[in-house]
Image: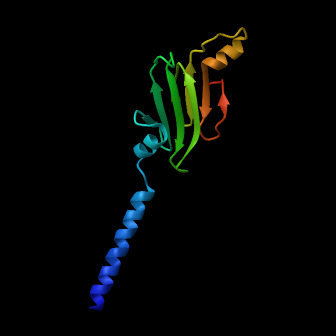
Amino acid sequence: MKVLNLFCIALLFIQCHSMKQSVKEKSIVQIATDLFGRNVNISFNQDKTFACFTVLKKPDMNNPVNALEFGVYSIKEQSLVYREQKYNASVEWFNKTNLVVKSRPGVKSLDTEQDKAMREYYINVNTLEITLKKPN
């Protein structure tokens, strides 16, 4: 009888532990969907330590331009570390630690540096530093 009780307790403990593990470790797809909605695209950097979640909303009567919403998710920290929204833009991995964001500004600036900054910049996902220079 004692053996049967010990077996039942061990089985119950193993079952509870595996349920706790599955709740704690959500899939990356579920996390992206929870944060950005159903039509989210996911791309990983080269060593799969970060994921970029993107949603492109097509033009409609209320918003006549493409609206890009994107975020950077740290696999290690299991949290969203950066989020931004741009119009008429695209984002992609430049290398394993940098994203490149390209956009068409709606209004051009007379200052060419300012104009360039509105068109293309790089985000270092480790430091969250934004720069206009191409990273090495």
Q: Nearer the viewer, residue 96 or 80?
A: 80
Q: Position of residue 82 (x, y in %)?
A: 59, 38
Q: Position of residue 15 (x, y in %)?
A: 34, 69
Q: What residue appears at the point 51 percent right and 23 percent down from the top-left corner? A: 67
- On the question of residue 135 being in view, the answer is no
Q: Nearer the viewer, residue 34 or 90?
A: 34
Looking at the rendering, in which quadrant would you find the N terminus? bottom left
Q: Is residue 84 rendered to the left or right of residue 56?
A: right
Q: What residue appears at the point 58 percent right and 32 percent down from the top-left corner? A: 84
Q: What residue appears at the point 45 percent right and 41 percent down from the top-left corner? A: 32
Q: Position of residue 124 (x, y in %)?
A: 61, 35
In the picture as drawn, the residue positioned furthest to the top comes out as 110
Say how the picture is coloured.
Answer: rainbow
Q: What residue appears at the point 46 percent right and 30 percent down from the top-left corner? A: 55
Q: Is residue 85 above or below residue 1?
A: above
Q: Quadrant of residue 118?
A: top right
Q: Quadrant of residue 42?
A: top left
Q: Is residue 59 above or below residue 34?
A: above
